Image (cartoon, rainbow, N blue to C red):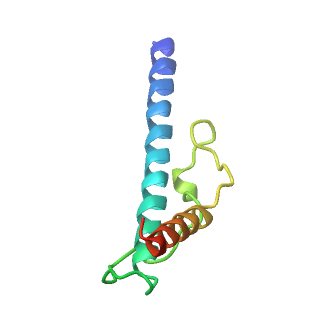
């Protein structure tokens, strides 16, 4: 039984880590796109977006083994995505 629980924990932990990574990636992408749209220099009507700009995965979602704090800045990541989109929009890409 203990072996089963360890195996189950490892599988659940891997799923959890993948889910948090997907949430982080989707947040960065969506926040970056919406920031590009809302910057006022892109010919698209402003859209509703997040109520703030998260910079880290919240403490409650971190796990010491499966998703520890990596030190990555979500704010830096979505701002880079925004800047990339704006520069490509300006070039007509």
Quadrant including the C terminus: bottom left
Can you give x and y, in whole percent of width and height, for residue 30 in the image?
A: 41, 63
Q: Is residue 50 visible?
A: no
Q: Of residues 47 and 92, which is closer to you in this image?
A: 92
The correct choice, above or below, for 2 with respect to 18 in the image is: above
Can you give x and y, in whole percent of width and height, for residue 21 in the image?
A: 50, 46
Can you give x and y, in whole percent of width and height, for residue 40 in the image?
A: 43, 87
Quadrant including the N terminus: top left
Q: Of residues 3 and 76, which is closer to you in this image?
A: 76
In screen coordinates, is 57 left or right of 43? right
The quarter of the picture where residue 27 lies is bottom left
Report the label total: 0
Q: Residue furthest right?
A: 71
Q: Of residues 34 and 63, which is closer to you in this image?
A: 34
The correct choice, above or below, for 65 with respect to 37 in the image is: above
Which residue: 50% across, 39% down? Answer: 17
Which residue: 63% across, 45% down? Answer: 68
Q: Of residues 57 and 44, which is closer to you in this image?
A: 44
Q: Is residue 88 visible?
A: yes
Which residue: 45% across, 25% down? Answer: 11
Can you give x and y, in whole percent of width and height, for residue 35 in the image?
A: 46, 75
């Amino acid at each position: 039984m203990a072996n089963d629980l360890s195996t189950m924990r490892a599988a659940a932990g891997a799923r959890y880590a993948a889910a948090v990574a997907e949430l982080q990636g989707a947040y960065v992408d969506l926040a970056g796109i919406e920031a590009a749209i809302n910057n006022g220099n892109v010919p698209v009507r402003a859209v509703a977006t997040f109520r703030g700009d998260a910079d880290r995965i919240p403490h409650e979602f971190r796990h010491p083994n499966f998703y520890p704090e990596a030190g990555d800045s979500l704010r830096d990541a979505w701002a880079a995505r925004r800047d990339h989109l704006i520069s490509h929009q300006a070039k007509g890409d």
